[in-house]
Amino acid sequence: MIRHRGYLLLACFAVLASTGGLVLPLAANPNEQYIKDENPVQEAEAAKRGVLWVLDFKFLPPRPITADIPGRGRRVCWYMWYQIINRTGSPRTFIPDFEWVTHDTRMVYRDQILPSVQEAIAKEMKLDSTSYYDIKNSVTIAATPIPASLPKAAPRAVTGVSIWSDPNEPNPDDDEATRKQKLALPKFGDSNRYSIFVAGLSNGWVPDEKAKGVVQRRTLQLTFRRLGDKFALRASAIQFQPPEKWIYRASVTAVRPAAPGK
């Protein structure tokens, strides 16, 4: 894997601009990370599944945002901005599965589709009406295959956002018993060490040896650390802890038996 940090790219652009070779672009975000596979298309002869492909993943560390969620009230949610770049030579469908796993409180949180939070994110990012609809969530980004980027052309990135809301926060209509139960459970803010697992960037998978009908997908693991206490809810407190890892991890995707002769 090759990781390009934003400030390294900016430095390269600056050198080229000073020699007249390139017009200097807008400043890149120094927290931006780019996970790029050196060989995005490989023959998968050992698995007898044809071609193994991998999509590039560019992202910013998770950051908090406060928004109103129907039925839940005003909540502090977390989101991660990302872009998908396809250098495999053919359109690929990205069916994402984002999971936030805490290493200290041992909780698992799944990405959620929250239109009101997505709208608040667009406002925070100061997107215009056209750009707002270019931001995909985990459902809409799977509706259209990611277009292939030509080798010598500018990358055709598709932008998405994953969103997490703490299910252990009480809702306004919870009864007293449910509210008391939720208050006793760990919260997002209680964790300082966690990983976000991103499945769907590759078509690689293997059968799960322990669970029939379940597969393990080739999954990207990104590890983060939060500096400060849970009251310091700011984007700069979340730091990516390289390197990234590729693992095979159990998925909720079910496998149907193949038809006879296939």
Image (cartoon, rainbow, N blue to C red):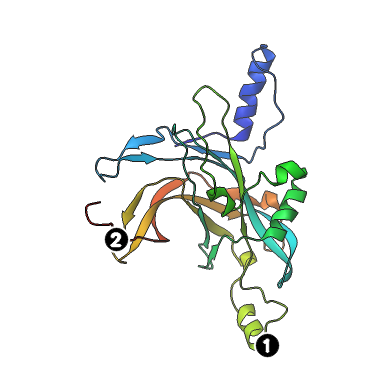
Q: Which residue is mark 1?
A: 176
Left or right: where does residue 94 sit relative to residue 23? left
| Circle 2 Cα neighbour tier, 10 Å, few/some/many (<14 / 14–19 / ≥20) | few
Quadrant (top left/top right/bottom left/bottom right) for the N terminus:
top left
Between 253 and 22, the one nearer to me in the picture: 253
188, above or below 96, in the image: below
Please identify, in this view, whether the residue under mark 1 or under mark 2 is nearer the observer.
Answer: 2
Q: Which residue is mark 2?
A: 257
Q: Amino acid at mark 1?
A: Glu
Left or right: where does residue 182 sit relative to residue 85? right
- Asked whether the beta carbons under mark 1 and mark 2 sit within 8 Å of each other, the answer is no
Q: Is residue 251 visible?
A: yes
The image quadrant that residue 159 belongs to is: top right
Q: How many numbered discs, if any?
A: 2
| Circle 1 Cα neighbour tier, 10 Å, few/some/many (<14 / 14–19 / ≥20) | few
In primary-sequence order, the first of circles 1 and 2 is 1
251, above or below 182, in the image: above
Left or right: where does residue 116 sit relative to residue 255? right
Element marked by disc 1: helix
Residue reaching furthest left?
261
Residue reaching furthest top?
19
152, above or below 108, in the image: above
Task: Say which residue appears at 41% left-offset and 35% top-offset.
Answer: 40
Q: Percent from the top left, x then y, of residue 136?
A: 62, 49
Q: CA distance from mark 1 to mark 2?
A: 46 Å
